[in-house]
Amino acid sequence: MKLRVLFGLAFVAVLLVVTTGAGAVVTITEFPSPTPGSQPAGITFSFDGNLWFTEYNGNKIGRITLQGVITEFSIPTPDSRPLGITFGFDGNVWFTEQIGNKIGRITRQGVITEFSIPTPDSQPVGITFGFDGNLWFTEYNGNKIGRMTPQGVFTEFPITTFFSAPGGITSDFDGNLWFTEEIGNKIGQMTLQGVITEFSIPTAGSVPAGIMSDFDGNLWFTEYYGNKIGRMTPQGAFTEFPVPTADSFPAFITFGFDGNLWFTEQAGNKIGRMTPQGVFAEFPVPTAGSGPYGIAAGFDHNLWFTEQYGNKIGRIAVSHPRRE
């Protein structure tokens, strides 16, 4: 299929919310995905300044500029179900193909190369860069953490807990990898040498999903069924913060340039913001039933997110009115 270049400026929905206390104005703008029913999922910033996202049902990788212009690139493997996505230190963008059972690489020019994972039907889900220069990913069905060099050499590390269903994965500044175990209900740590340590989450059946680390070495993660945002120290001490909206299904999480945590509420149809001290604010997505999913901070200091069911990419801008 040929490259499709389209842009989502024909219809834009905007919502303004004035937050209480600080007087900041939050503006959500939405850009429709060109492919109908594409189900945008993971999203990441890249060193080219754009945001890149996976189209789980569209079988494409999308690129959106900071002005909202979308370009799509078709994946060679049919029905590969791309899901997780990350930038790499090599300047390329890397992604998982959950059903294709591959790791994909896409250049800034849109050239895609695929690398087959050794374990059949491993169902790769999350992916992140490593400070060792490699790519690290979770194998949801294979119950392993995978490592791949930029040249395509794989190493796989089995997780001790049986069918833990690893999902999200992130790096910390000490070089370790941290991941969520959706069925195991744990947070896992893995060194670059492959040594795995697991920490049980206090809330039973919480289904941890997205995860990220901060400068202090703490891990922040979403509890999809637990309806909480969790924090864990590197030593394994947990603190949990309940999301105000009931049954919101918090999915993925990132830090914003304002120093707060921002996360998607897939069932609540909101974008949540939480201070590191646990103070929440929530902002409804204009499109009803949009299913906000992935979220990332852009170089424009805005937050960008995918709408899995709304079939759009959303942008969150926070402005502070000038004081006279």
Image (cartoon, rainbow, N blue to C red):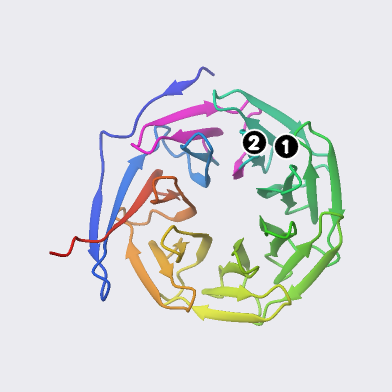
Q: The residue under label 2 is which amino acid type?
A: Ser
- Residue 78 in magenta stretch: yes
- Is 252 placed above or below 230 here? above
Which quarter of the rendered picture does the N terminus lie within?
Answer: top right
| Secondary structure of residue under mark 1 | strand
Give 110 or 310, whichever is nearer the viewer: 110
- Residue at image position (54%, 40%) is 54
Q: Residue at x 47, y 62 (%)?
A: 263
Mark 2 Cα shell of 10 Å, populated few (<14), some (14-19), many (≥20): many
Q: Tell me if residue 52 comes above or below residue 245 in the rendering.
A: above
Q: Secondary structure at mark 2?
A: loop
Residue hosting label 2: 80
Q: Quadrant of the C terminus?
A: bottom left
**Mark-to-mark CA distance, 2 and 1:** 8 Å
Magenta segment boundaries in residue numbering: 57-86
Name the one closer to the observer, 141 or 67.
67
Q: Which residue is mark 1?
A: 102
